[in-house]
Amino acid sequence: MSLRISSAVLGLFALAGCGAQSPEPAGDTIACAIGTGADFAEVCTLERVAGSPQIVIHHPDGGFRRLTYDPATGTLVPLDGAEPVVLEEGQGVLQFAIGPDRYRLPREPAAAPTP
């Protein structure tokens, strides 16, 4: 009987840890539309990886996209086997899609990430 009670208590502690919030990622807020049919909103965070041309775009639900800037082609390339980047029309911004998700980055920072 005590084994069942202690197992139940341990299970409750494990569940309590699942609800903990991760700290907000550091970076600039950017517009994104996460999922099919979503409208753009300023809810994603653009994080630059120090010392590299990589960026991480954090979604508000905890998801993220890792990309790198290829100076030879001047394009963003997804990392970790993600779907390809598809450029879209955007005035004054770099607008692109990866799968059903769409993003808008300021053209200058996207074109020349700080190493």
Image (tube, rainbow, N blue to C red):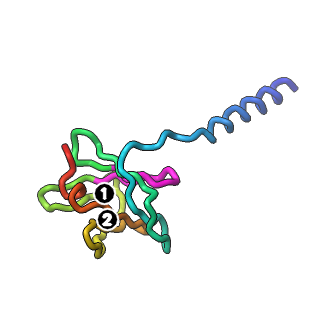
Determine the image quadrant of residue 31: bottom left
Residue 93's place in the image compared with 45, above or below, is: below
Q: Using a 10 Å C-alpha cutoff, classify the residue at mark 2 as few (fewer than 14 neighbours), some (14 to 19) or many (20 or more).
A: some
Q: Residue at x 22, y 43 (%)?
A: 52
Q: Residue at x 56, y 41 (%)?
A: 21
Determine the image quadrant of residue 67: bottom left
Residue 22's place in the image compared with 5, above or below, is: below
> In the image, is residue 59 part of the stretch drawn in magenta?
yes
Specify the segment rendered in magenta: 56-67
Q: Secondary structure at mark 2?
A: loop
Q: Residue at x 20, y 46 (%)?
A: 114
Question: Along the line of sight, which residue is nearer the eye, 78 or 104?
Answer: 104
| Residue pointed to by mark 2 | 84
Q: Amino acid at mark 2?
A: Pro
- The spot of residue 81 in percent (x, y) is 34, 56
| Residue pointed to by mark 1 | 78
Q: Residue furthest right?
A: 1
- The spot of residue 69 in percent (x, y) is 22, 54
* Residue 111, numbered circle: none
Question: Along the line of sight, which residue is nearer the eye, 13 or 111?
Answer: 111
